[in-house]
Image (cartoon, coloured by chain):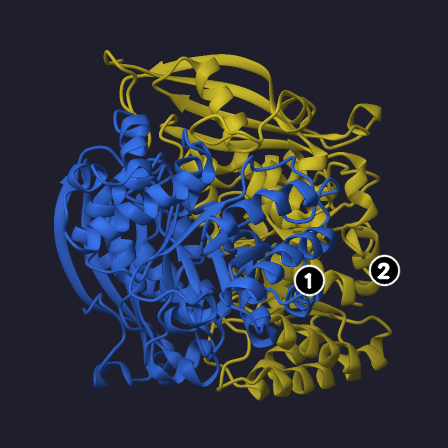
Chain colours: A yellow, B blue
């Protein structure tokens, strides 16, 4: 299975292939067949209408089984042991092929098929969807990111380096006027990108309509002077009617990006928003920990990012190296890689690096991810810099200059005081 | 905390109260403050704009902490131990109050606030959102189920007993014509309710438009003869544009119910669909196992059902006693209870009992849930009955007659051959 994406003729097929990591007290073959049956033609007893012809056509097929280790304790509760006991839980990777005709070109039903009831099966004590191959047919309905990397770079006027940005902090509480002041100062300092916090959408203390006007007024003035427009991702997360209306407000005010909390709005809303949107969609994945943090439950980022790219997300959050969350660095790097691997004829989403980021992560992010196709966001790393937000921004710009030229950060800091101050302030955390 | 719902004057406040079960290697107070900070004003360093006034206004507050047991192994990976080690992980229930003004009347942002980034915190090795109190202000924007129990009973013409129904099986593969034939036969036998499988929405082998025409033609003919209209829940799960279009097709054909896969379409899509829908919305929760199966991760059904009722789901799946999935009976009963507990001024959703159901579960479902306000669905229990689907349906009708009159099932079976046959066929599984 090619986890790098859905390229090549193999995928021009009429089947959907899902790869699962499972754990089961049953013989693995039996559990795998149960999964395939439950998610296609099956019920708990044979049915009158279930002819051989229909079974041949509609039943999902177990393609491969690769045994892994066994464990003595189940990862999840509720697995039923086979008759006569059974004292171990076998782990395995299995692939299951679903006929495309079962699902049609329908993202919500695709999800119901490959990641629906099967998390509830008592035949497994663990189940994680770890990869998904989709036939090209999906491109007929889902066009993927409208802007992606190239379009985002064009709109923001940044090439050859990461798009450097920040999140408006404090997360909540600022008025539109206070927000616009922060934007003005950061804009003057040359920042590429600013986003609302995911906790800030359209609250009474900062109505989105007013925030758009106040912020875009600053951004448009600045763009008139510099010829380059700061990209601001307005958090329009809401019911779909409201999101469409707010998208129009952003566009009409000259804005160049909208942001949504992906898990909170859902796949159907994103796909519909994508059809109407004339702006890049910044996809925030808050709630992601619920979906993936347990190693034997949920969905991997490899699958997650394919679904949201297909539905139209232009930017996808991936955490960052040495983030303040639970996620290990290797996992972050795999997520960056996933967003930058082709899906169908590209459908690239720009990985958004964030969480506890400051100048210090630039060199190893570049060395290990081997790309500048990133949106690199620092909150405190910019806003709390001892020299002020402008110096904070400079420190990160300098760190990325050093990184792409493979110059040691300490060495570069000798002639770059903002970077030096950042290393001094944040270097021993 | 009143887990029965949001009734009484206490809730007419301006705050959102979330209750979490957490597990942490840190002192619980410290972890709780971290959660409150992260999900309101916080970042990893103090910020210039974060004034005392703003903190007072915007910061979430830890209300209560109740210590539970401690464990020696973390439930989730990635929790960072405090300096100097720490060899146990303390569990606790905590409640956190968020100012309503932080969020506004915005369901996706509510979710981002109470169930967003915090699953990723390295300060916890387990986190489950187990209850949620919402201020009445939400009713100004979210009207809850449009039909609920009373509306569903009116449309289906069933009072004083559960609405008895089935799922079209096999799950996938049948043509519209074959589906309509099944509907005709079950309709003649007097079934109240039929639903599409969650795997069946609008696939090439059964286009929804054709299925609606074929099925409603049978249902309308039958209703003309009997004066009572069988409720059929058409699975319209799709992008929102398509769902709205398909809703109209169902309505125009005289249909009385639409069904969606809640987790696949998302909260924003449901809330928008609710605004436009003239039909009850049957909420299927496939994917639910991912959200709740691990005891120390995710969201409880108490919270889940409040969110979806608020967004407008009229029916909510809850599994059933002795279901074929992992879920224990006590959990199923709590879920039924949750749907039938008032939220604001009612907002009741009809619990949908399903999964491995047949006549045998009627008596203890009634005895333990103490209600007939249920949609009771049997797949194989109807369709695979040795006497055919009509006899299968009769066996369940008879079982519920016995149940509500508290007559022993075996005794009732002596004069009801379809029930007797069901006990014979399914009784020893």
Can you identify the residue that label 2 sits on? Answer: A154
The residue sitting at 19% across, 41% down in the picture is B409
- Look at the picture and state if A243 lies above or below B233: below
Does the image show residue A396? no
At which x and y percent is residue B357? 35, 40
Within-10-Å neighbours for mark 2: few <14, some 14–19, many 20+: few
Given the image, what chain letter belongs to the residue carrying mark 1?
B
For the N terminus of chain B, the image quarter is: bottom left
Q: Are marks 1 and 2 on the same chain?
A: no
At which x and y percent is residue B288? 42, 47
For the C terminus of chain B, the image quarter is: top left
- Total numbered labels: 2
The residue sitting at 17% across, 55% down in the picture is B405
Does the image show residue B214? yes
Q: Quadrant of residue B93?
A: bottom left
Can you identify the residue that label 1 sits on? Answer: B246
Circle 2: element type:
helix
Q: Nearer the viewer, residue B30 or B48?
A: B30
Q: Nearer the viewer, residue B156 or A106?
A: B156
Distance CA(mark 1)–CA(mark 2): 38 Å
At which x and y percent is residue B416? 27, 40
Circle 1: element type:
helix
């Amino acid at each position: 299975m090619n986890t790098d994406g859905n390229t090549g003729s193999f995928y021009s097929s009429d089947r959907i292939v899902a790869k699962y990591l499972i754990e089961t007290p049953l013989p693995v073959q039996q559990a795998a067949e149960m999964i395939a049956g439950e998610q296609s033609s099956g019920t708990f007893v044979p049915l009158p209408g279930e002819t051989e012809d229909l079974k041949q056509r509609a039943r999902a097929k177990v393609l491969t089984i690769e045994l892994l280790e066994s464990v003595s304790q189940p990862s999840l509760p509720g697995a039923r042991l086979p008759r006569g006991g059974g004292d171990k839980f076998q782990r395995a990777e299995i692939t299951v092929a679903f006929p495309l005709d079962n699902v049609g070109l329908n993202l919500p039903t695709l999800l119901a098929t490959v990641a629906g009831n099967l998390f509830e099966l008592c035949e497994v004590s663990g189940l994680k969807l770890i990869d998904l191959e989709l036939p090209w047919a999906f491109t007929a309905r889902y066009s993927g990111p409208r802007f992606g990397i190239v379009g985002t770079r064009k709109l923001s006027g940044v090439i050859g380096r990461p798009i450097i940005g920040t999140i408006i902090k404090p997360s909540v509480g600022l008025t539109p006027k206070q927000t616009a002041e922060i934007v003005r100062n950061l804009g003057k300092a040359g920042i590429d990108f600013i986003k609302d916090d995911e906790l800030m959408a359209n609250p009474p203390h900062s109505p989105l309509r007013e925030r758009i006007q106040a912020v875009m007024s600053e951004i448009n003035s600045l763009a008139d002077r510099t010829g380059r427009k700061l990209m601001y991702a307005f958090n329009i997360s809401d019911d779909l009617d409201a999101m469409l209306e707010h998208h129009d407000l952003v566009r009409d005010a000259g804005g160049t990006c909208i942001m949504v909390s992906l898990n909170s709005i859902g796949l159907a809303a994103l796909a519909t928003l994508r059809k109407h949107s004339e702006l890049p969609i910044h996809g925030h994945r808050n709630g992601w920990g619920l979906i993936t943090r347990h190693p034997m439950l949920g969905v991997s980022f490899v699958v997650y990012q394919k679904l949201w790219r297909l539905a139209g997300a232009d930017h996808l959050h991936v955490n960052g190296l040495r983030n303040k969350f639970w996620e290990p660095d290797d996992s972050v790097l795999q997520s960056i890689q996933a967003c930058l691997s082709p899906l169908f004829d590209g459908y690239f989403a720009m990985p958004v690096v964030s969480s506890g980021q400051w100048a210090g992560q630039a060199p190893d992010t570049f060395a290990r991810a081997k790309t500048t196709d990133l949106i690199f966001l620092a909150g405190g790393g910019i806003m709390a810099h001892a020299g002020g937000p402008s110096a904070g921004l400079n420190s990160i710009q300098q760190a990325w200059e050093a990184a792409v030229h493979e110059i040691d950060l300490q060495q570069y800091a000798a002639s770059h005081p903002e970077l030096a101050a950042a290393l001094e302030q944040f270097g021993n955390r």
